[in-house]
Image: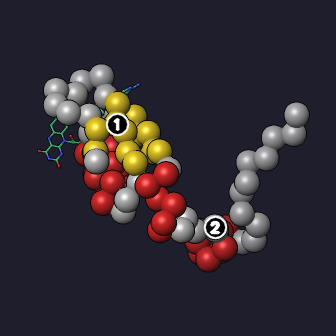
């Protein structure tokens, strides 16, 4: 089996810009059909989950120290 790490080609300083300008975008109509699982709901996980849910993705969160509801709708 061949491993493909998908590192963008080009100069290191340009890799992120190149990736952003060439990556495939999700059609807004398809966002609700995409499930995203966020593991860990600290500051980083919770803010990512909230932002992705606001964008329309179907987000589920899991955290072993959580005390409240764990699904963003
Ligand atoms: C004592 C203390 C005081 C602090 N005071 C401040 C402050 O006053 N102001 C400030 O800005 N910052 C403060 N910080 C720093 C701040 O808390 C962290 O920078 C911030 O919480 C990091 O957020 P995070 O989302 O990266 O990680 P975390 O908040 O640690 O979130 C990670 C979450 O992932 C969960 N998790 C980990 N592994 C798994 C797994 N396998 N499955 C499911 N869930 C998992 C954990 O339970 C946790 O809830 C303080 C930190 C400490 C320790």
Callout 1 environment at 10 Å: few (<14), some (14 to 19), or many (20+)?
A: some
Q: Ligand 1 within 8 A of label 1's CB?
A: no
Secondary structure beneath dot 2 equals: loop
Q: Nearer the viewer, residue 58 or 64?
A: 58
Drawn side of residue 46 relative to residue 18, left or right: left
Q: Ligand 1 within 8 A of label 2's CB?
A: no
Callout 2 environment at 10 Å: few (<14), some (14 to 19), or many (20+)?
A: few
- Rendered image quadrant of residue 18: bottom right
Residue drawn 66% across and 73% down?
22
Residue drawn 49% across and 51% down?
33
Where on the image, by quarter, is ligand 1?
top left
Residue highlighted by disc 2: 24
Up-down relation of residue 67 to residue 19 (above or below): above
Drawn side of residue 35 relative to residue 23, left or right: left
Dot label at residue 61:
1
Secondary structure beneath dot 1 equals: strand
Farthest top residue?
64
The percent position of residue 64, horizontal first and vertical second, equals 30, 22
Disc 1/disc 2 C-alpha distance (Å): 25 Å
Specify whether residue 39 is in view: yes
- Rendered image quadrant of residue 25: bottom right
Q: Nearer the viewer, residue 52 or 12?
A: 52
The percent position of residue 17, horizontal first and vertical second, equals 59, 75
């Amino acid at each position: 089996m061949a491993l493909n790490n998908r590192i963008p080609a080009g100069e290191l300083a340009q890799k992120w810009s190149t990736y952003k300008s060439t990556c495939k975008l999700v059609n807004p109509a398809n966002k609700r059909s995409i499930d995203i699982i966020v593991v860990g709901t600290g500051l980083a996980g919770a803010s990512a989950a909230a932002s992705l849910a606001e964008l329309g993705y179907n987000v589920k969160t899991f955290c072993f120290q959580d005390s409240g509801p764990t699904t963003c709708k």
